[in-house]
Image (cartoon, rainbow, N blue to C red):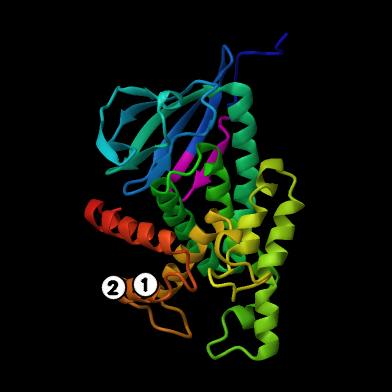
Amino acid sequence: MEVNPNRTYRKNGQYPVLRMTSGFITLLGRWNGIAEALFSLNENSSFCAQYNPDNSIVETYTLLDGEVEIEHIGERRKFEVGETIDASTFEKVVTLYATSNAEILMKMEADFYEQLFFETQMLQIEMDAVARVDGYTYHHCDRIKQYAIEVWKRMDRPKHTLRLMRWGAFFHDIGKLTIPLEILNKPGKLTPEEWETMKTHSRVGANLLRAHPVDWLKEAAFIVEQHHERYDGKGYPYGLKGDEISLEAAIVSVVDAYDAMTTERVYKQALSTEEAIAELKKGRGTQFHPDVVDHFIEVLGTKVKNAF
């Protein structure tokens, strides 16, 4: 028998809040086995609505206010105020794109969502730690996550790998927390010794995830470990090549390189989008998985077209 099936999470006048770069989610409570939460989605932000990969539970979203578009298998339409969608009834992942600030009521099977909410809160604390140590790395990782998900969708990956893609992409550089800042931010070329230290971050990061208390995050360690492997086998740490490299890691490799090229740092100027795309094309089939490069270039074209 379920204990206290109906309850509010309001305590001392406040509700639990999960902060994200796309907005924040306020957990309101659970009633009749269903958790309810309010998602405040920021303008020009997006959100993949399918948390439950096997469609075994209800997962509904009701637009309360704002302007939002729904994307499913490449097709977009307006999400009407007052309309409710059940993401579990869609064949593929559903993405919500906000063209203004928006308020969305979420309802999901309570035991599933409450655990996910509080585990993600734990990850948010670690994300904040990354931001405090190195603000560039934090924002870089968030951009990598967004780019990677868009490529992942275009490559028609299984729905159950979305969570791995999202968090493996975000934490791909978590191992850099162990690298001295004087190496991370060095304006000149790294010495051979410094380069060897820098290269440890992928294995260190993977080990951090494998030791993580959130069980499902451990499964994303392979993405962190492999994201500096090259398609031609000349990468690190293991010299994997071709299909020996997971497609998720290959996606991170491409979008990571693009973001690094188009972001200005103390030691380099940023390239334009066109210049960075030209560099990706040069590395197609050598440094980078050729299919991933092709799909990412398509994503960049769509991003410009839709202003996201």
Up/down of 164 relative to 53, above or below: below
Quarter holding residue 71: top left
- 113 relative to 206 in the view: left or right: left
Which secondary structure lies at badge 1? helix
**Viewer-nearest residue: 127 or 209:** 209
Residue 276, image x and y in percent? 35, 74
**Viewer-nearest residue: 291 or 207:** 291
The residue where tag 1 is placed is 281
As drawn, which residue projects farthest toward the right?
A: 211
Quarter holding residue 299: bottom left
- The quarter in which the N terminus is drawn is top right
Disc 1: CA contacts within 10 A as few (<14), some (14-19) or many (>=20): some
Residue 10, image x and y in percent? 58, 26
Q: Which residues are magenta?
A: 13-24
Magenta stretch holds residue 139: no
Q: Which amino acid type is shown beneath numbered disc 2?
A: Glu
State the mark number for residue 274. Answer: 2
